[in-house]
Amino acid sequence: MPKSRVQFHEILLVLEKSMPAMIEKYPGGGDFMSAFVREADLITSDAASEDHAWIHGQIGCILDEFGKLHEGYPVPSGEIKLMSD
């Protein structure tokens, strides 16, 4: 049986509280993101399909709070700075 949003909220709070230790343990961006994705996948694997968007939104907020939202993802083309600029 899928978990309720209240249960997921509690799990996401644990993930949020673990962020400083995870960032310290994995200072390299790729290593951190791999570890974070493993944790996030464990959360989403128990979710009903109608909860996935909400959970991913919460996960995005956690990443954003710690300045990790776009880490490991391509930079939007408008934000690329060329050396000649």
Image: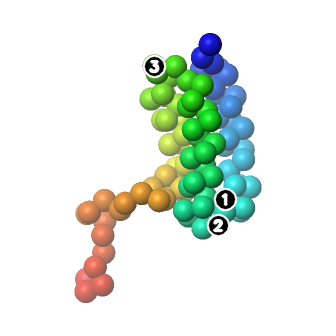
Residue that badge 1 annotates? 23
Q: Residue, x 66% and y 62% (percent of image)?
A: 26
Coordinates of residue 5 in the picture (x, y in percent):
59, 20
Q: Amino acid at mark 3?
A: Glu
- Name the element at disc 1: helix
Disc 1 crowd rating (10 Å Cα; few below 14, some 14-19, many 20+) is some
Residue that badge 3 annotates? 50
Side (left or right) of 32 relative to 51: right
Coordinates of residue 75 in the picture (x, y in percent):
35, 62
Quadrant housing residue 13: top right
- Could you tell which of marks 3 and 1 lies nearer the N-terminus? 1
Q: Residue, x 62% and y 35% (percent of image)?
A: 42
> Which residue occupies the foreground of this view, 58 or 43?
43
Residue that badge 2 annotates? 27
Distance of mark 3 from mark 1, alpha carbons? 30 Å
Regarding residue 68, the answer to whether it shows in the image is yes
Q: Amino acid at mark 1?
A: Ile
Q: Residue, x 31% and y 59% (percent of image)?
A: 76
Coordinates of residue 38 in the picture (x, y in percent):
61, 45
- Could you tell which of marks 3 and 2 lies nearer the N-terminus? 2
- Name the element at disc 3: helix
Q: Residue, x 71% and y 62% (percent of image)?
A: 24
- Name the element at disc 2: loop
Q: Indicate whether 52 appears above or below 65.
A: above
Are dots 2 and 1 in contact, CB under 8 Å? Answer: yes
Quadrant housing residue 28: bottom right
